Image (tube, helix red, strand yellow):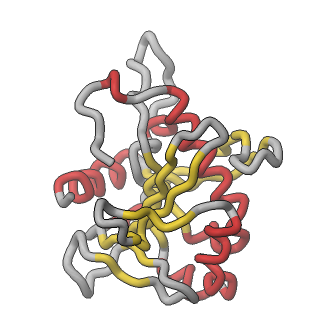
Amino acid sequence: MPKPATLDGYTDRHTTDCERVLVTLLRGLGPWKESVFLIGGLTPRYLVPTKPPAVPAHAGTLDVDIVVDLQILADTEAYHTLEENLRRMSFEPFKNDRRQPAWWRWQTRTEHGALMVLELLTDAPEIAGGRVRPLDVDGAVSALNIPHSSMVFDLHQVKEIQAELLDGAGIAVERVKHANLVSFTWVRLFFVGGR
């Protein structure tokens, strides 16, 4: 999915739906959610508390990028059911142009048909940046290696987010651990520059 070249390519609805994906994901992951840190384009929404007109509105995003803490994942018994949990929340592997699944990208659709993409990222120094690392879980889940993305584990903020769940089960509040300004900037340089 190509990123829009201008601000006009983003919509408030899509960004709000990304927030709904994030809250639905955290609500559905149980103990596994402790290993999830938001790093992507949704993050500026929480980094800049001042609202327009003093600060321009957040452009928006078309997907949800999260960094997975492999150490917490390894210490959590529930991690074995990650693929099952994603499928239970109506996510399925994203398919590339050749219809092959990309196990680090998961997708779902909102009730109004918008395609929502969740990207699983990790810091795996044993492989090159931009390579995919299988996660040690039951199933075929993997994460894209983004060098130094683990800095978000130490350099993050926490914000309570309220959003409507994608499955129509009402409204939920979840604590979102998101990159602070330093980790967001550093990781985005690698993530955007390396893709």
**Quick check: 73 left or right of 44?**
right
Which residue is most to the top?
53
Q: Nearer the viewer, residue 43 or 114?
A: 114
**Where residue 182 sits in the image (x, y, percent)?**
33, 50
Q: Nearer the viewer, residue 98 or 192?
A: 98
Q: Quadrant of the C terminus?
A: bottom left
Picture layout, residue 82 above or below residue 5: below
Q: Nearer the viewer, residue 8 or 128?
A: 8
Picture layout, residue 29 above or below residue 162: below
**Where residue 131 sits in the image (x, y, percent)?**
25, 75
Quarter of the image for residue 120 reads bottom left
The residue that appears at 59% across and 51% down in the rendered structure is 22
Quarter of the image for residue 3 reads top left
Picture layout, residue 194 above or below residue 124: above
Would residue 154 be visible to someone looking at this image? no
**Quick check: 4 left or right of 105?**
left
The residue that appears at 69% across and 40% down in the rendered structure is 163
